[in-house]
Amino acid sequence: MLPIVWGKEPKLEFFFQYLVAGITYGTIYAIVAIGFNIIYNATGIINFAQGEFVMLGGMTAVTLNQFLPLPLAILGAVVITMIVGAVIEIVFIRWLHKPSVLRMVIITIGISILIRETALHIWGESVRALPYFTGSSTSSINLGGVYISSQILWVVGVGALAVAALSGFFNLTMLGRQMRACSANRDAARLCGIDAGNMVTLSFVLSAAIGAIGGAVVCPITYVQYDSGTPLAIKGFTVAILGGLGNSTAAVGAGMILGILESFSIWVLPTAYKEAISIAILLLILFVKPSGLFGSAEAARLKEF
Amino acid sequence: MLRIKNLESGYGRLKVLKKVTMHIGAGEIVTIIGANGAGKTSLLRTISGLIRARSGEILFDLQEIGALPPEKIVFLGCSMVPEGRQVFAPMTVRENILLGAYPQYRKRRGDAVRDDFERIYGIFPRLKERERQLAGTLSGGEQQMLAIARALMARPKLIMMDEPSMGLAPLIIKDIFAIVTRLREEGNTVLLVEQNAKAALGIADRGYVLETGRIIMEGTAEDLLSNREVQRAYLGRDLDAEGRM
Ligand SMILES: Nc1ncnc2c1ncn2[C@@H]1O[C@H](COP(=O)(O)OP(=O)(O)O)[C@@H](O)[C@H]1O
Ligand SMILES: [Mg+2]
């Protein structure tokens, strides 16, 4: 079914514009999904407050930017969100002894409501945004006939960097390996002298960090409000499931799929349906292939070993 | 080296270990034999800190460790090779071994770790060949070797092994026991838990017999091997099992 809006002469630029928009949103979804995965791998918990980390990153950066230069404001926002992540783990999660999944779902949803209400109290309902990092909201860059705003390059670039940095951290550093060891086999990790409790705190700190970075780079485009974390959490969760829970490489691919599907859906569906796509995908994948698009029986077997 | 007195522990309301008293001297191989469900694994998990002791004392190098978490106990020099190997399946063989050296890194002995790699690969050349392979793809015997290698990287004063021969082919079991003997020759102290009583007593200096959470007998390996009670209850059954293999 070809999009009707293309008219008689399909315009290639339009195609690219939609593609670029899709990739931009896909990057953000992937970042949120990776945040889910980091905590899931360390604890088996789905942290439904993940979207709130993104919101906090954006909101705090906007506030700090009133009296700090932009890079410092973003750095400060990331650090503050990391501290929030650590506090959440230490106050709400750490003392729980082998909690049930349902209990964890209720607790993390509770945390997300708590953060949202606190944000409402601090910032009110107003919608805010950081300025574009370079150029302005009206200027754009010409990439082979396609005009894209410079902030999109920032989103995709910073997203790619964050993913690469995380991957390096998990695969090349002792600390990253310790975290992977804890998620592979907690008791065996403790028998190697690894403090599993600290690794869980670290997972909250890391996923708060990546969420906040995402929130800061994307808010010039999407704006940010006290409750903008929730829809992102749903999208990010869809992407995490689509890629296979815990698999961050696949989350990047899945993020692109959802972002691009949403973006092109405007051609064939009324705009109102755009939001329904992720829910539809989520339900479909949960029914058809709960291990995720890229989840293989082999990987699942290895994980359970 | 290790001195346990009236140790009791269990899971929830279930009390598994009852008044266990035993000791291990430096340089010894001590074995604990007992039927399935006797509490051997629970005993090792209690010593290593994975299960909290309820009462009694565990002295390691004269220090009370009964209330310490496992990560602290490893740092003191008491390592365990857990039952069922428990390697980090989605990580490479080399990463598994490296993680075993974590206490050495914390003690800032990074250079020593490189020598330790050489030493470990000397004992287990198979692991060097498979350095880059994921641990989950190794055979059972190779995984057991990896689990031992990982524990050795911490340079433990005492290494506890929980049924290292479980589920392995006879030839590989021979290799594993040869390695345990070699470890002792290099000055290590070993606490070996086995259902394969004959093989274990064959290499051990002393042994304890555990039955439903109590030590019912102890003595030198020769004494236990020639004890009629032990022969009937543990060695007889063992021979049957070997016959079936
Ligand atoms: N995680 C556990 N929870 C509750 N009971 C357990 C657990 N592990 C072992 N047990 C019980 O403790 C007893 C001793 O088990 P274990 O220490 O594994 O014996 P062994 O290693 O000698 O076979 C058994 O009765 C077993 O059912
Ligand atoms: Mg056992």
Image (cartoon, coloured by chain):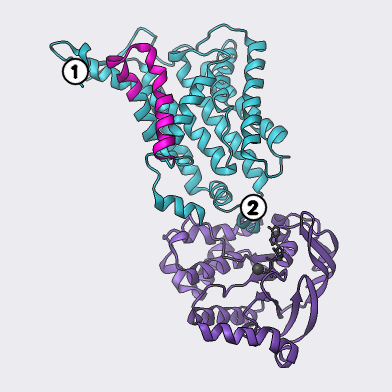
Magenta stretch encompasses residue A18: no
Residue named by callout 2: A194
- Relative to B92, is A101 above or below? above
Tell me residue A163's x, y (percent). Answer: 44, 35
At label 1, the amino acid type is Leu
Residue named by callout 1: A12
Tell me residue B9's x, y (percent). Answer: 79, 61
Magenta stretch encompasses residue A281: yes
Mark 2 crowd level (few <14, some 14–19, many ≥20, 10 Å Cα): many
What subunit carries mark 2? Answer: A
- Left/right placement of residue A226 relative to residue B221 reads left
Instruction: Please identify which colour was used for chain A in the image.
Output: cyan
Ligand 2 resides in the quarter of the picture at bottom right
Mark 1 crowd level (few <14, some 14–19, many ≥20, 10 Å Cα): few
Tell me residue B206's x, y (percent). Answer: 74, 84
Of the residues under marks 1 and 2, which one precedes in the sequence? 1
Residue at image coords 57%, 82%:
B241
Q: Nearer the viewer, mark 1 or mark 2?
A: 1
Instruction: Please identify which colour was used for chain B in the image.
Output: purple
At label 2, the amino acid type is Ile
Q: What residue occupies the far left of the structure in this picture?
A: A8
Mark 2 lies on a secondary structure that is loop
The stretch of residues the image draws in magenta is A261-290
Residue A47 or A132: which is nearer the viewer? A47
